[in-house]
Image: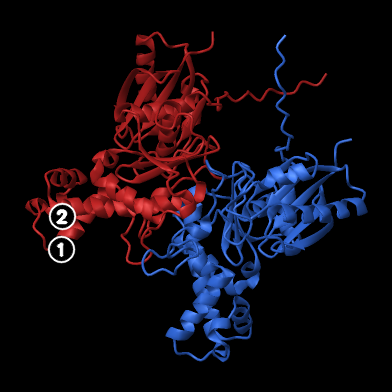
Chain colours: A red, B blue
């Protein structure tokens, strides 16, 4: 009997979530550990291994895992490594696939970054089922992207393709980005970008706003959302500004790969019409006429709590890398 | 014996060039007709057919054509049609593959746009041999692009992907583009874009320049090139301006597909260091650190006179569409 489950592992900056997933995308069971508890990578892997084994045992799934898919910040599909992830403590390059396959006795492993995993999850179980060309945009603390062309994830020649959070949306006088440059999309259209816009608007503009009652440095995108839902005009205009920039940037993405849909995922994507109306207006206005009306803008259909694990797990079905113990260097016996 | 040749047809705004090409990319023979001579599409196809047949006869290649590849403005790979090509007179939608396959007795035909054909030519015979991820930028009257990901041309869900000449490089106060929008890359970095820049610079700036001796409305990119080669400072700065905008736009393209190389083709690409130095400087400065130093900027290795036909011909090897005469609607005889 072929093995009916995959293991999906999502390594986030705070939690590492792992789950057993079946072929229909049902998360049979899941659990998590704290990602940053161990500064030593082997210790981290060991704790994750123990957590997973407990889960496998409880659900009698020890011999039923077809493959392991892992989504990790700066996870590289080609090398199976995590490379220079800004928020992880284990060193500049970590051999993730190798260590995980080894500790799980040679089960095949595949690694990719979190946004690519989200795209794969959407294609396998969500809003992009049946689509061969789409773009996934994750609107979280930063802006990530996973691009699918001809039914395949776009990894690029080095495994790092799909950094659409770092296209430049303001050439002059743009905001400073964590990547060291200025004007990146994610400095405007992420949760932190919305909070930065709020601070700028409050400083430069004079209208009254309930946001003025808050400590300016502590304002979050959630505060802006709550204020906008409550009818605050300035807060609504912050979403207008955010949606417009995102819609314009998305129109340029269509000129690249002419996708059937762009799918939005993450906290900000749940802002409803506050974000979507200005976004769609700007998108329709900015798009090249030949593409007009052709590309759908959709919201993710995956439950946020499951999405990361589901996305990672989807990679488990096609995982190929398998750790093999080095063969001892036996002396050659001459006859 | 399998058939040793393909036919490459490049439909340009002025000439339609066709050639017999062998598997090693040698153009055995080629000829051309005027594209705009016939306002009726069937008449145009008939003249092209006669020209090709003459060539096939002269080289005894009548039964040796494996397939026909055609590059055409707004040529659609999926439908085999030319759709809304601004400079062609035959109507909004022309069934190119069908007509060509029919008149050539059912030889398989494939159609794509001219920039995609150029990319295919470069991958099959030129600077992109062996590459699975690259972007071709054609710098002609306009700016076109052909994108290859995982060894396949990116057509998008509708066959129109790869319009990188129409990404927006100036959000505010950008130049009006033929596509009806403002600020498109091709309004700055095409041959006509360079001429527009010259006119702007001459009007706004006060430095002396040999370009001031020309009728301002008649200035071409060739005039600017000649002046720059002759040491004219303003002309050199026009290339500086052009190269900087193109380099910045190319850095954003890398964030999408992380290609091994971006390959430049067309008249402007032959401007040497005048264009390439500022282009590479801007590219290196604007690129996301994770990609820095990874993507090569190359010039096409195909001879310009052959490139279009070679590119189109490369599509001939994989051509699948084959015209089949409709079956007559025979009356059903009841027994």
**In x, y percent, where is residue A326?**
60, 25
Disc 2: host chain: A
In the rendered image, which residue does mark 2 sit on? A234
Quadrant of residue B228 within the rendered picture: bottom right
Question: Where residue A205 is drawn, which disc sits there?
Answer: 1
Q: Give above or below for B179 relative to B271.
A: above
Q: Is residue B290 left or right of residue A283?
A: right
| Residue A74 coordinates in the image, percent (x, y) | 43, 41
- Please state which of residues A64 and B6 is positioned toward the viewer in this rendering: B6
Image quarter in which the N terminus of chain A is found = top right
CB within 8 Å, label 1 to label 2:
yes
Does residue A170 sit above or below A279 in this rendering?
below
Under circle 2, the secondary element is helix
Label 1 environment density (alpha carbons within 10 Å; few <14, some 14–19, many ≥20): few
> What chain is tagged by disc 1?
A
The residue located at (48%, 28%) in the rendering is: A315
Q: Do marks 1 and 2 share a chain?
A: yes
Residue at 41 percent across and 38 percent down: it is A115
Alpha-carbon distance for marks 1 and 2? 9 Å
Quadrant assignment, res A199: bottom left
On the image, the x and y values in percent for residue B115 come to 62, 55
- Please determine whether, in this image, residue B304 is positioned above or below residue A331: below
Choose the circle earlier in sequence order: 1 or 2.
1
- Quarter occupied by the C terminus of chain A: top right
Q: Foreground residue, B258 or A124?
A: A124
Residue A304 visible, this orientation: yes
């Amino acid at each position: 009997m072929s093995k009916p489950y995959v293991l999906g592992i999502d390594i986030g900056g705070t939690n590492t979530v792992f789950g057993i997933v079946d072929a229909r995308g049902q998360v049979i069971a899941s659990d998590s550990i704290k990602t940053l508890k161990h500064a030593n990578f082997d210790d981290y892997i060991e704790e994750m291994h123990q957590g997973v084994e407990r889960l496998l045992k409880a659900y009698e799934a020890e011999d039923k895992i077809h493959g392991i898919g892992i989504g990790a910040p700066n996870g590289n599909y080609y090398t199976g490594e995590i490379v220079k992830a800004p928020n992880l403590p284990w060193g500049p390059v970590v051999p993730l696939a190798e260590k995980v396959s080894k500790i799980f006795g040679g089960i095949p492993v595949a690694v990719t970054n979190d946004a690519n995993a989200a795209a794969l999850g959407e294609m396998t179980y969500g809003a992009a089922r049946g689509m061969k060309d789409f773009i996934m945009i994750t609107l979280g603390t930063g802006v990530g992207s996973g691009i699918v062309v001809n039914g395949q994830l776009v990894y690029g020649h080095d495994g790092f393709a799909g950094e659409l959070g770092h296209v430049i949306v303001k050439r002059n006088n743009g905001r400073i980005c964590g990547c060291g440059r200025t004007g990146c999309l994610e400095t405007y259209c992420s949760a932190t970008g919305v909070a930065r816009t709020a601070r700028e608007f409050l400083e430069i503009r004079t209208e009254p706003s309930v946001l003025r009652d808050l400590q300016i440095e502590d304002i979050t995108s959630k505060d802006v959302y709550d204020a906008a839902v409550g009818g605050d005009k300035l807060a609504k205009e912050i979403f207008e500004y955010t949606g417009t920039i995102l819609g314009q940037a998305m129109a340029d993405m269509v000129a690249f790969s002419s996708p059937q849909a762009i799918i939005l995922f993450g906290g900000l994507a749940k802002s409803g019409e506050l974000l979507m109306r200005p976004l769609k207006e700007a998108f329709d206005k900015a798009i090249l006429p030949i593409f007009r009306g052709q590309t759908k803008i959709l919201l993710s259909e995956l439950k946020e709590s499951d999405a990361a694990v589901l996305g990672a797990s989807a990679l488990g079905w096609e995982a190929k890398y398998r750790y093999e113990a080095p063969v001892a260097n036996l002396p050659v016996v001459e006859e």
